[in-house]
Amino acid sequence: MRQLLLLRHAKSAWDDPKLSDHARPLNARGRASARAMGLRMRELDLAPDLVLVSSARRTLQTLEALTPWDETPLVEPMDALYLASARAMLDVIHNVTETVRSILLIGHNPGMHELAMMLADPASPGRHGGMAQDMWARLSEGYPTGALAEFTVAGPWGTLGEGGGRLQQFIAPRDLPDIAA
């Protein structure tokens, strides 16, 4: 089984109108939620082999706040992931070598939400047993900044498509004890 982790960048700042969208940094709340998500990922042993990250400043800062990793993954910043559609993100995943067991993709909405919905099967069992219907329902409502979806993938990366992921969990910053809603 392979693992696909989809993380939307954490909350970004809008206070400098001179900055381009690509250059916007995380705000204080975003940095805190990304650090908390990194802690939760370590608690759940969610350690990617490969990180595919949009080249935008806020996604790179989100990645930085997730560290340290027990084992340092290969990190590939990609212009192609900046504001990418679900289909464009899936194309990037399709080109990952088959020796990679776990991918963390850090990107933007609406493509991130659309990709998660495309891959999710609402009837698949989740990490904690039972049906993933509740997680799927939460996912279908939206993909907040800093949220993480974990999928297991049975086949090769190159064939991943609609319904090809089993949603294991969906975690939003508001679910983390270190973050106030």
Image (cartoon, rainbow, N blue to C red):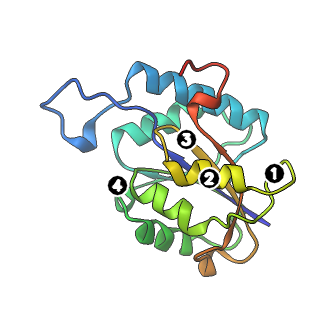
Work out whether mark 4 precedes mark 3 in sequence or the reverse, and give the earlier one: 4
The answer to whether 12 appears left or right of 2 in the picture is left
Which disc is residue 82 wearing? 4
Work out whether mark 4 precedes mark 1 in sequence or the reverse, and give the earlier one: 4
Instruction: Name the amino acid, label 3.
Output: Ala
Work out whether mark 1 precedes mark 3 in sequence or the reverse, and give the earlier one: 1
Which disc is residue 137 wearing? 2
Instruction: Name the amino acid, label 1.
Output: Arg
Q: Quadrant of residue 22?
A: top left
10 Å crowding of disc 4: few (<14), some (14-19), many (20+): many
Q: Real-space Cα distance between discs 2 and 4?
A: 27 Å
Residue found at x 34% / y 45%:
56
Q: Position of residue 127 (x, y in %)?
A: 81, 51
Residue ranking furthest to the right: 129
Work out whether mark 3 precedes mark 2 in sequence or the reverse, and give the earlier one: 2
Q: Which residue is mark 3?
A: 147
Callouts 2 and 4 close, C-beta under 8 Å: no
49 or 3: nearer the viewer: 3
